[in-house]
Every structure is written in C-alpha cells, then in structure tokens.
Amino acid sequence: MMGIRNQLVCILIFATVSAQSLDDPWLRDPMLVGLWKLTRAINSFGFNLFEDLTNSLDENVLICPYSLSTSLGIIHFGSVGETEKELAGILGYKAVNLTKDEAAQTFYMLSTKQLQSSNPKFYIFDAPSTIIVNRKNGLIHTFQRIVEVLFQAPVTVTDFIESSEHLVRSVNDWVAARTRNKVKHIIDSVDPFSDMIVLNAAYFKGVWVHKFPRENTELGIFYNYGSRSTPTEVHMMRMTNILNFHKDQHHSIVELLFKGRNVSMIILLPNNLSGIGELEYKFSPDFLEEQILKMSPNDVDIVLPKFKIRFSADLTESLKTLGAETLFHPEKVDLSEMVQKDSITFGEVLHKTVVSVAEKGVEAAAATAIFSFKSFPPLLEVPDFYADHPFLFVIYERRIKMVLFVGRVMEL
C-alpha cells in the first residue's frame, strides 16, 4: 500500500505559537535570536499547513510541525537555487531571515537542550532523526557531517536491492520504537532503485498537573461536526480547578499544564455548536498568542471528552499549494548539496499521527513519510468549559512558545 522509493519519513507529536518581537528581553542575547527565528518559522509553517488541511478535509486533523520541519529542514540544507528558495519560503525561514546554516545550528540547540525534559516523570519529548542511503549512491560528505552533528541524524548505508525486505522491517521497527509503538507501520515496500530514506520521529507523553478524577468520568454526548443530528456517546472527564482561562462572546480558551509546567495543552472551543469554521478562519500564530495573553487563573469547571484520534494524509498537494513546485519536478529540483547525482525528486509526503487524551494526561505520536522518487447525562450546572462539540487544540512549549502539535477534533 505504502511503498517507498527515495523517501523522507517523519514521526511526530504536539506544540504551539508566539507573536514576539525582537525587542523581547530574552532575545537581547544574540545566541537566542536563531532560536526565536526557528520557533517562529516552525509555528508559521505548521499553521499554514494546518489551514490548508482543515480547509480541504472535513475530519479530525492532527499534525506535528516540529517533526515535519526537521525532515524538510534536512532536505532544505541540501538544496540550492529555486528549490532552496521555495523551501525557505514554505518553512518560514524567509519571513524571519533565517539562513540554512542558522537553521541547522538551531535545530541542534532545540534537540539537545531546549526540548529536553528536566524530569521524565513530568513529560517526555523525543524527536530523533536518521538517514538511510542506498549503497549505489551516496551523500556528499559535507552534508553527511552536518546532518549527523547538527541534525543529530546518523547515516546508514545499505543495499536497497539485496536488503529490501530487511529495510522495510528496519524502517517500521525504527518508527515503532521511537513512538513507543503508537505508530507501528509506515511503509509496505521499498523501491530497490531508491536513493535514500530520511526519517524523523517524535514522541510526547505528559502527565497533567491537575488530573481529572476518574470518579467524575461519565458517559455524555459529543456532537460530531457540530450538528445535533450526529451525536455520539463518549466518556466525558470533569474537574474543577484553578486553570488559565478566558471566554468572550465567540469562544473559550483553557490551558491544561503538564507536570514541570514547561509544556501545556491549550484548547480553543467555539461557543456555538457549529462555530468551528469561524474559529478556524481566525486561527493563526498571532491569534493564538493573543488568546494566551488574555488568559488568567480562574476557578474553572471543565468537561472534556476522553479521546484518541488517528490522522493519516498525503501532504504532497498541500506542500505544492504552499509553494513547493520544483521539489516535485524531476527536471527542476536541485539537491546538489545533498547527493552526488541530480535525479532525485520527491513524490508522496505521507503523514501519520496519533493522540490519546485521558484522566492522567496525554500520549501522542506521529509519522510522516515523504517519498522521493527518481525522475454524559444532562448536567445540573452548565460547566464553564464544556467540550461537547468540535474544538481545536495545541501542545505548547511554553518557554520558547513553539508548536509541537496542532489538531482539530471533529468527530469521536
């Protein structure tokens, strides 16, 4: 079903957005300017992709901008000419004046320092990368050194013809291991004439600061697609606690902290049952940051469904819509700083994600494959935040204000 020729495979999880300026105090340190630029770029790319998907799909959507940005960032580092310019625009580098060297160095800072949890009992975020190269070809030595050191992506050389079945098992095993078996399968076959496979995996597991008491969980109704004609019975969690919260005439926003308080899940809920479209229209990095700033500690009665959603999509057309033209054109693509040949182009970009939300916390994972080809009962009191209809959510790294995951729940 999902064969692989020359490929890029990613595995992902959650995050969110910021609208800072370079006047912010923490950016007076020049060492942090690159970090600010990259997080802004990742957020911008993630929201642009999310907007394209939610406009074209009427279903649950979940993407991991960080993982996609890492994999595409590796390709961008090996690109030149129009391909480099296109990827710089899509990835948000151009808007913040981020060079490919700055991006590579900052990915290293993110993966080795900024995104590391101080205590794995609070939360775990792991996002390793690797590259598998067909023995008959090869990466340019300088490119290989950069991706191994700065992107922390070890390179393996193997024979794609003689080791095809073993390679499929190795790729799927790598994906499963890095997502703690949340995504167990990404490919069915490998084209023996492939040149490479680029993999990125991300895994997140967080424990709530304020857990939902199990005894409060009851069966309730969730209105799929925001319609009273499509209700479904689900387990609804409920608690009352001091939470960051804001509500206006259009929507509510609430923040659920994970232990360690560096990462949180932020949920945006339209007031109207069918208001998800209006909320999506406004949804952007700047809008999210504005809403976060409006939140303040409140005593909040919150009802939230337990849910597990899986999302799988080919992102090729979305990336083309965002501006990736030469990357998918065999006669125009230029990856001459990556490989010792000029016949690599990219075909399918498959993305798989999973998230599970329950009383104790959240566990999420995702996988993206970029194939490169040659040529409750009625409530007596209405809660302050009652998520019984479609909503948006992000997993948010609060220190650097970066989107790890962004999702939409349309049906359960």
Image (cartoon, grey):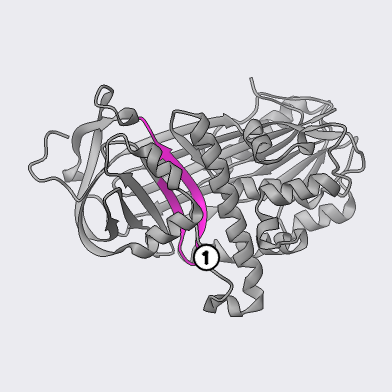
To which residue does mark 1 refer? 400
Q: Is residue 374 above or below residue 357?
A: above
Residue 117 versus residue 331: which sits nearer the camera?
331
Q: Is residue 344 magenta?
A: no
Q: In this view, does 366 lie above or below 34?
A: above
- State which quadrant residue 288 falls in: bottom left
Query: Is residue 73 in view from this perspective?
Result: no
Tell me residue 245's x, y (percent). Answer: 28, 59
Amino acid type, callout 1: Ile
Residues packed near mark 1 inside 10 Å, few (<14), some (14 to 19) or many (20 plus): many
The quarter of the picture where the N terminus appears is: top right
- Which is the main secondary structure of the residues drawn in magenta? strand
Query: Is residue 300 in view from this perspective?
Result: yes
Which residues make up the magenta segment?
393-412
Tell me residue 267's x, y (percent). Answer: 36, 49
The quarter of the picture where the C terminus appears is: top left
Residue 282 versus residue 26: which sits nearer the camera?
282
Tell me residue 270's x, y (percent). Answer: 31, 43
- State which quadrant residue 158 falls in: top right
Tell me residue 273's x, y (percent). Answer: 27, 36
Q: Position of 151 compared to 172: left or right?
A: right
Instruction: Give the structural element (helix, strand or loop) at label 1.
Output: loop
- State which quadrant residue 221 falls in: top left
Q: Is residue 411 magenta?
A: yes
